[in-house]
Image (tube, helix red, strand yellow):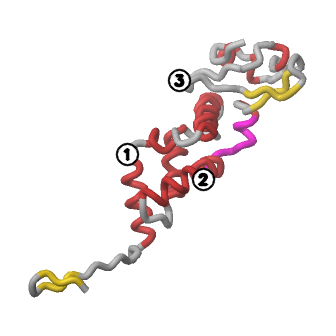
């Protein structure tokens, strides 16, 4: 017990009474900080979001990037009470997992696969999104490696791809 003149000063640290409300408030404050703050936390998450953005152009079953990211951030913040807990959850792949749970990965893999077989390399080759997230070029520039994919034979898609 600490006293200041006749006043007794006592400090107590207790968890919030309503964890659901605390998680909602944490989500709102995290969103105020900006979605980019949270989405740029891992290269793996950035690649997934770029693939989603590309796939959402061609399929209505892939929701827009910001909508999926907001929902995933809300789910990630549920039950948490501090930015420190949220940062830890995001850093440990929590946000990535929640984003992945929000999308149809089968459709995503069909439209915007993360890897593609390349006969010239004799292995799977990583497909790397451009920084502006509007193009989806292939690391392997040999068009025979991906010409068989039906979506990639359209002129609209070819304008988004680099060979």
Disc 3 residue crowd, few under 14, some 14–19, many 20+, Cα 10 Å: few
Question: Camera-side residue: 9 or 31?
Answer: 9
Q: Is residue 106 magenta?
A: yes
- The earlier-in-sequence mark between 2 and 3 is 2
Q: Which residue is mark 3?
A: 132
Q: Which residues are magenta?
A: 102-109
Q: Quadrant of residue 22?
A: bottom left
Q: Position of residue 149 (x, y in %)?
A: 80, 23
User: Which residue is pictured at 67% across the width and 20% down the height?
Assistant: 137
Q: Is residue 11 above or below residue 36?
A: below
Q: Position of residue 105 (x, y in %)?
A: 71, 43
State the mark number for residue 92.
Answer: 2
Marks 2 & 1, CB-CB < 8 Å contact? no
Asked if residue 158 lies left or right of residue 9, the reply is right
User: Which residue is pictured at 60% across the width and 21% down the height?
Assistant: 135
Disc 1 residue crowd, few under 14, some 14–19, many 20+, Cα 10 Å: few
Measure the alpha-carbon separation of dots 2 and 1.
Answer: 20 Å
State the mark number for residue 33.
Answer: 1
Measure the alpha-carbon separation of dots 2 and 3.
Answer: 25 Å
């Amino acid at each position: 017990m600490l006293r200041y003149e006749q006043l007794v000063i006592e400090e107590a640290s207790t968890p919030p009474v309503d964890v659901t409300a605390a998680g909602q408030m944490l989500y709102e404050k995290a969103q105020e900080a900006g979605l980019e703050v949270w989405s740029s936390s891992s290269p793996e998450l950035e690649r997934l979001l770029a693939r989603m953005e590309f796939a959402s152009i061609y399929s209505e079953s892939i929701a827009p990037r910001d909508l999926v990211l907001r929902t995933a951030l809300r789910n990630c913040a549920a039950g948490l009470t501090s930015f420190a807990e949220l940062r830890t959850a995001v850093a440990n792949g929590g946000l990535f997992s929640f984003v992945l749970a929000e999308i149809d990965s089968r459709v995503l893999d069909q439209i915007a696969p993360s890897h593609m077989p390349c006969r010239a390399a004799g292995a799977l080759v990583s497909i790397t999104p451009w920084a502006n997230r509007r193009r989806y070029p292939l690391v392997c520039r040999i068009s025979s490696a991906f010409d068989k994919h039906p979506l990639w034979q359209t002129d609209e898609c070819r304008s988004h791809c680099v060979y």
